[in-house]
Image (cartoon, grey):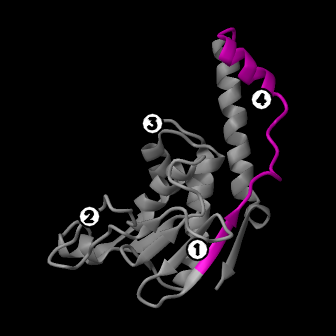
Amino acid sequence: MSYPTFFDTIEVIKVKDPLANVLGAFDDGVYEFNYLDVVKSAGHSCPTVAGAYIVTLKALEALYPNERAIRGDIKVEFAESLEEGVAGVIGNVISQITGATDKSGFKGLQGKFARHSLMFFDSKINASARFTRVSSGKSVDVTYNPSSIMPNPQMQPLMQKMMSGSATQEEIKEFGVLWQERVKRIFENLESVVKVTEL
């Protein structure tokens, strides 16, 4: 399997999952998610998928300082509706990492370990997402905006050629390289693309 090498340089998200422990999936329920994991699930790497990973990483660092985040203990809210823009894509990535889902998620075992009703859309927040640690009630708002990381100007004409069906295989490959270079620059400039506000 071949993929951009910068994927391996991105900070991993460490979690502890009580359900995984009870069901014997991981010793003590301890495991990790990396950027490659979410890229596989999404089927692609882009500023949106990167942003979903970044806001989750930074929110969990704020909610669980010096300890692993607890899957199933995290509520997530979005201002957008599920059908709007890329909210669904972002929600899927965050759900994979945190376990939080809307009504469709795991219903639990005898009242414990439920994952449903932890993700909400159309919330009255002024941020990309709000993460709440259910056990403590502590919340953080996370705002993600990659607009300062401009795409390479060569991408637009290459995109036009691809959409018209006139791009060569070399040009298609070049577009993909330039696309991932922008994603890489987003991860290299987290200070300018993400803001975490403790509530």
User: Which comes before the other along the chain, label 3 or label 1?
Assistant: 3
Disc nearer the start of the sequence (4/3): 3
Q: Secondary structure at mark 1?
A: helix
Pointers 3 and 1 in contact (CB under 8 A)?
no
The amino acid pointed to by label 1 is Ala
Mark closer to the chain start, 4 or 1: 1
Which amino acid type is marked by label 3?
Met
The magenta segment: 140-167
Residue closer to the observer: 91 or 64:
91
> Which is more toward the observer, 187 or 60?
60
Label 2: which residue?
106
Circle 3 residue? 1
List the single residue furthest toward the top: 166
Comparing labels 1 and 2, the label whose residue is closer to the camera:
2
What residue is disc 4 on? Answer: 155
Residue beneath disc 1: 59
Real-space Cα distance between discs 1 and 2? Answer: 23 Å
| Residue plotted at (56% across, 59% down) | 53
Whether the residues at callouts 4 and 1 have beta carbons within 8 Å, the answer is no
Amino acid type, label 2: Phe
Quarter assignment of residue 71 = bottom left
Question: Secondary structure under badge 2?
Answer: loop
Is mark 1 in CB contact (under 8 Å) with mark 2?
no
Task: Say whether residue 53 is visible.
Answer: yes
Q: Amino acid at mark 4?
A: Met
